[in-house]
Amino acid sequence: MNQQQLKNLLEDMSLEEKIGQLLQLSNSFYEDEAVLTGPAMQLGIGEKQINEAGSVLSVFGAEQIKSIQETAMKKQPHHIPLLFMADIINGYKTIFPIPLAQGCSFQPELVKKCASVSATEAAVSGLHVTFSPMVDLVRDARWGRVMESTGEDTYLNGLMSEAMVEGYQGDRSGEKLDQFGHISACIKHFAAYGAPEAGREYNNVELSERTLREDYLPAYKKGIDAGSAMVMTSFNTLDHIPATGNKWLMQDILRGEMGFEGVLISDWAAIEELVSHGIAEDRKEAARLAMEAGVDMDMVTGCYINHLQELVENGQLKEQQIDEAVMRILELKNQLGLFENPYKDADDNKAAELCLCEEHRRLARKAAADTMVLLKNENDILPIQETAGKIAVIGPYGEEGRLYGAWSLQGTDADTVTIKEGIEEAGYDNDQIVFYAGSSLLDEDEKLYGFKGLVKQYRERSNEDLLQEAVHAAKGADTVVMALGEHAYHSGEGGSRADITIPECQMHLLREIAKVNQNIITIVFAGRPLDLREIADCSKAVLYAWFPGSEGGSAIADLLFGMQSPSAKLSMTMPYSVGQVPVYYGGYTSGRPFNGNRTNRFQAVYQDIPNEPLYPFGYGLTYTSFSYSKPELDQQVMSMEDELHVSVTVTNTGKRTGTETVQLYLRDLKGSTVRPTRRLKGFERITLEPGEEKQVTFKITEDMLRFYDIHMDYVSEPGEFALFIGGDSATQNEIRFELQSQK
Ligand code: BGC
Ligand code: BGC
């Protein structure tokens, strides 16, 4: 349709019909009897409202979606098609590593490819929109949804946000949304959902406007600039105002400053939750507040459908406001080509052909290998040599299929390559390898509730029994590979934890094995950074596998036996202990920074633990080593219009080919507000042969030096700056330059 046709359509619609477009229903409304019982009854939504709804979420499968679409269009007065949306977070059927792991790749191009494959599989399965990427900056590992973010860094998150949007939508303009295999992205959760107080899910957010603007908003902006057709509001409050009813945030910042013109959807039931938050008297007031804030679509509550008409009729809202929201939704349907082809790419045959096809699995395998972080590798115990002798693989993750994390709604154990399967295929002499669970995954007394109720543990034998045979196997082995970790449902939505360790039964197993065998390589599965101290102490090597997805087991085998080398770097700080959290690189100095000498009590330091994390942001080893030369500048002084170049030479000082991510950090030594001790400003991945060296050069321009100054203006201030270049955020490889004021 052209613009005029869209306008004509809008003009022809009744107010009631228009309000229908703003309603998104959940899949449960399309199950038999839904209208008479369950959700519909509770929400006050009848058959008429269902027939006029604009969108549905969480229906899966091409045939099912086509059939709902066909029926819905017959009933909708103007035969307007529905938008089908779902959470495709790290893959549809082919599951990629969780987003936090994807951040560790430091490869936006790879992340874009994963998003593009996810889009294709979702599109042929009938979907039009994914609720991804989640670009919330995260600093608190207690919060379970850190797994869904790409990490703690503003710059890295921004690149990943852009990459994912382009991967899903096909290009920056969103003009290609109607083409085969493309779906709309939805940037979420606007804003600052990643900063819930004390890491507790849905908790309120206390952020200064400066921190919000400087650290949190840029990644949303990057995704919006990349053309994201949708944005989702967040559940949290910000400055005591719930985001979903926050006019300043949505109108002034999102639509005004950021220039977002697409569809703004509430998070699940977030409009109605304005009542629980205590800023709305009832659902009617909630509807008014959300509409005034500029929320276009109501995810699964009856607030809009039941109250907007009355609010317009009694003059509390203008019909114009409704029209604008409806128009944005019609425009998205039009961009997706739904008026011409309401089924878009939905095709069961294509889905069967493409989902989990060899090419997609190959990408998943590479992505998994490129996102696992090697944290420790004493005496080069990894990669395992052919001559390594007997290997015992011990731990509940050895044969576990749930390697795809909490948010992979279409992932299955059966579609996932386990460690055992991966290793058995790897070509190491299988007679030399044995597998023992050693313990259950969860502690006996833990009651863990997943997205679909209680997680049931299958226990045929006691942990004591399992332990005995594992210890026996460890005694007879030359090398032990421990496969341990959190359960997938320890993270994800509703996955906040105060104690960020793995279940005690698994720790007990590790301790007992460590008593009889010191050659331990531990693979850790987790949806968050954990307190790893004891695991690291007991192990010669630690490979942090996150939740790696469908090809997790094959990628682990690739890394264990050296067919691939690890190259990932932490996208989130690994704390020394939970007491440091929130902890992130490049925090602020205080007036009394710790000088390393504890005899003076009056310093910014813990009495019982170090200030430094166990492993810093940007950290990760590979099977070779690198040295860095001192950074060199092409000029010491820079003017506002100038650019400056800083170079280092990186040398592979080890015996194997390896990939290093060379990272550039910047510090503003003095500002009108206190500046962070460093921030990532660039990185480059390079691959070097043993002995090979390469010069890496970064360009510094004035815009990289800007921040929100004392007047909240985004500017740079003349003065001295430090640059750090190295293999992680703790590097002290430093050089300074000066920014001169304008003459
Ligand atoms: C989550 C969103 C998600 C939505 C729809 C909410 O609970 O916070 O991230 O997209 O549900 O499933
Ligand atoms: C303390 C103040 C105290 C002052 C003088 C400072 O270190 O923070 O509370 O009054 O010393 O003793």
Image (spheres, rainbow, N blue to C red):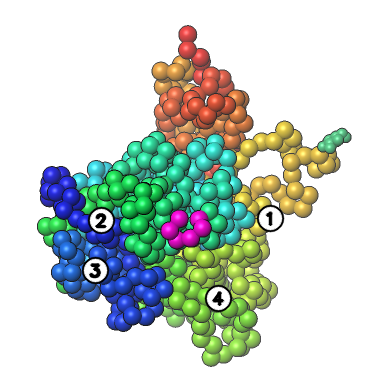
Q: Residue 448's mark?
A: 4
State the SS at label 2.
helix
Q: Residue 15's mark?
A: 2
Q: What amino acid is found at the position of numbered circle 4 in the picture?
A: Leu
State the SS at label 4.
loop
According to the picture, the residue beneath numbered tag 1 turns out to be 579
The residue under the point 63% across, 53% down is: 581
Which stretch is magenta? 280-285
Disc 3 or 4, which lies upstream in sequence?
3
Rendered location of residue 524, percent (x, y): 53, 65
Question: Can residue 23 be seen at all in this image of the molecule?
Answer: yes
Q: Residue 51's mark?
A: 3
Q: Disc 1 to disc 3, how far (Cα)?
A: 52 Å
Examine the image and state in which quarter residue 596 appears: top right
Rendered location of residue 395, percent (x, y): 54, 76
Q: What amino acid is found at the position of numbered circle 3 in the picture?
A: Asn
632 on left or right of 22: right
Q: What amino acid is found at the position of numbered circle 1 in the picture?
A: Gly
- Judge depth for marks 2 and 1 and give the one in front: 2
Q: What amino acid is found at the position of numbered circle 2 in the picture?
A: Leu
Disc 1 or 3, which lies upstream in sequence?
3
Q: Disc 4 to disc 1, how far (Cα)?
A: 24 Å
